[in-house]
Image (spheres, rainbow, N blue to C red):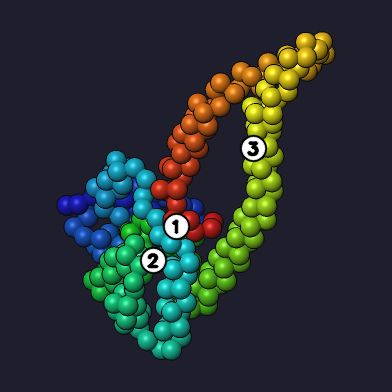
Amino acid sequence: MAEFVLKYADPRGEMHQQVAEAGSERELRDRYSQQGFLIYSIKPRREIAGMAIGGGKKKINLEKFLIFNQQFVTLIRAGLPILKALDLLSERLTDVKLAPHIKAVREEVKNGSLLSDAFARQAVFPPIYVTSVLAGEKSGALGEVLDRFITYQKLALGVRKKLILSLVYPCLLIVLVICLMVFLITFVVPKFAELYSSMSAQLPAATQILIAVGTTARSYILLGVVALIAAAVSIFTPRWRSRPYPVVM
């Protein structure tokens, strides 16, 4: 007997999750379905444990995933069975990150799993997508549900791109201003300090402080640049590695 992590809803609509034993996934699904429960997902317990030990999950590219869904919806509306549509698409995918998961989904469906369970078992697709597929299966309108998902994700992705583009110019200005201030403090101010020193001029306290800061900063400018680059790399490298899915939730 194998152990499975089962997620289901009771007749009142309340969600439950528990570990259950069964000879196979289909046996467990039939057992709970006969009791009137709505099954959301069934996953082997060892698979869940492996995911927890392994840390972060892999990500897939959002734009390529949306292209796959557009093609998938087109094939479904053309009257092709789901398995046949997955066969056609899985053999033509060029994305090395997405293709293995789609092929795995095809094999799961071929072995009798529900499409939503097959996507959920890959552990790389967002919950909102898996839930959308499940809703499409239950309502018999998979094409329409996926079409809404695609429209929503395209809108969210467009807003995200516009937001990033709108922040580029202010960020560039801030960087230029900081560079100009660093240049003035570390190179221009010390030159004036040498000039005033040769003239033996009496300077205000604020000017003396500024000259002292500039003279000191000039000695540590290279160390400061190296530290800033190291800090930026340490902050952004983990985020960059954890990205390339990021389906908008």
Q: CA distance from mark 3 to mark 1?
A: 34 Å
Tell me the amino acid under the disc marked 3: Cys
> Pointer 2: residues within 10 angstroms few (<14), some, or many (20+)?
many
Instruction: Identify the residue position indicated by label 3 in the image.
Output: 179
- Residue contact at pointers 1 and 2, CB within 8 angstroms: no
Q: Earlier in the sequence, mark 1 or mark 2?
A: 2
- Looking at this view, is 213 or 106 the one in front? 213
From the image, state whether disc 2 or disc 3 is nearer to you: 3
Residue lying farthest to the front in this orientation: 198
Q: x, y (%) of residue 183?
A: 65, 33
Q: Is residue 28 left or right of residue 66?
A: left
In this view, 108 is above or below 202: below
Apparent side of residue 2 relative to residue 171 in the rendered image (left or right)? left
Label 3 Cα crowd, 10 Å radius (few <14 / some 14-19 / many 20+): few
From the image, tell me which residue sits under label 1: 245
Report x, y in % for residue 17. Answer: 39, 49
Q: What's under tag 2, amino acid-wise?
A: Ser
Residue 22, image x, y percentages: 22, 55
| Residue located 29% across and 77% down the image | 91
Label 1 residue SS? loop
- Depicted 236 relative to depicted 214: above or below: below
Pick whichever, 142 or 195, lies toward us: 195
Q: Residue furthest left?
A: 1
SS assignment at label 2: helix
Q: Is residue 178 visible?
A: no
Q: Residue 154 sits in which quadrant?
A: bottom right
Q: In this rendering, would 153 be left or right of 97?
A: right
The quadrant where residue 220 appears = top right
**Residue at x 35%, y 81% (from the top left corner):** 85
Residue underneath mark 2: 116
The tag earlier along the polypeptide, 3 or 1, is: 3
Gap in Å between the C-alphas at discs 2 and 3? 52 Å
